[in-house]
Amino acid sequence: MRVSTLHNGHSVLDHAALLGGWRNTDPAAGGVRRLVLSDGGGDLRLRVLGAGRRQPYDWGEIEARAYAATPNLPAAWAFTAVHDTELRGLRLAAYTRGGLLVVTTYQAFSGPGWPAPYWTREFFHRDGPAAPMAVEPAGRYGDPRPTSAPLGPWQLDPSALDGLWRNVDAAATRLARVRIRERDGYLAVRPYGVWAPRRHDWHETVGSAYAGDMRSAVAIAFTAFFELAAGRVEMVGYLDRRLLTIETASTFGDGGHRYPCYVREHFYRAEGR
């Protein structure tokens, strides 16, 4: 079993289903071309190869966090990772589905004059044995930037995300609804969990907004982070066919020996907001 130790040192995940090479289904993709997931002494490691002018850019190997589908299953099906250089911050969230690896990326740059923060969703298929390849370095690593960014200086329009979003699944066990709004130039995100006997208020936090591409000024995706009594939650969300898809990656720290889990849910905008 290839395992990843949970931060409390007790629960482990088998992430064998994630390991190996994954190649972008679009050979002309301008961002991430190939991903390689490997075991590094019990930890999940990720190597990212991006599109280059002559050779693929080697973005280096970084730590990735693996997640199961539920807190009581030991098999990993998803992961998250963060890659930071002096010029760009990249957050990846990925899950397996039907033999594919579905990857969403959230990219932000160092300041004014650079493209707006933007979101992508790409699909990867399993690659054959990796042949040696010439690569170019992608840049130096820098200190990670703050996890929240204002809607400016790019002045992204948050209206497509603004409102009260309700879970389409009346029997959902994770989130019941999420309110998103602009507050003082920032994107504010407030989820309500499905915890009996009443809705559990996660409280409002500042998120980061992302456009659909680097030329757009309309925010269609976001990231946010929550520290709850039970543990830490990374949240990403994006609009897809008029629904808001929200993915939560939870790591538990309450001593319950639960596996970290990754959950996908879909939300519709409530009338009247």
Image (cartoon, grey):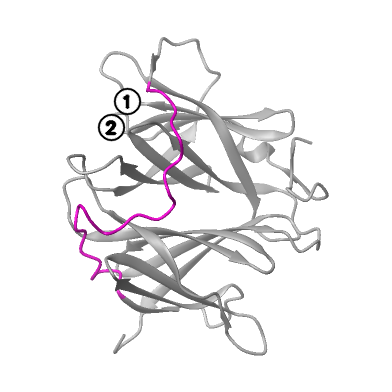
Taking depth in this image into account, of 147 and 245 the one nearest to the observer is: 147
Q: Position of residue 268 (x, y in %)?
A: 37, 77
Residue 188 drawn in magenta: no
Residue ID at (81%, 58%): 257
Taking the image as shown, residue 54 lies to the left or right of residue 198, namely left
Tell me if I can see residue 21 in this picture.
no
Q: Gap in Å between the C-alphas at discs 1 and 2?
A: 5 Å
| Mark 2 burial class by Cα count in 10 Å: few <14, some 14-19, many 20+ | few
Reading the image, the residue beneath label 1 is 51
As drawn, the residue found furthest toward the right would be 10
Residues at marks 1 and 2 touching, judged by CB atoms closer than 8 Å: yes
- Quick check: 199 above or below 122? below
Residue 154 drawn in magenta: yes
User: Which residue range is magenta in the image?
Assistant: 138-162
Reading the image, the residue beneath label 2 is 30
- Quick check: 239 above or below 180? above
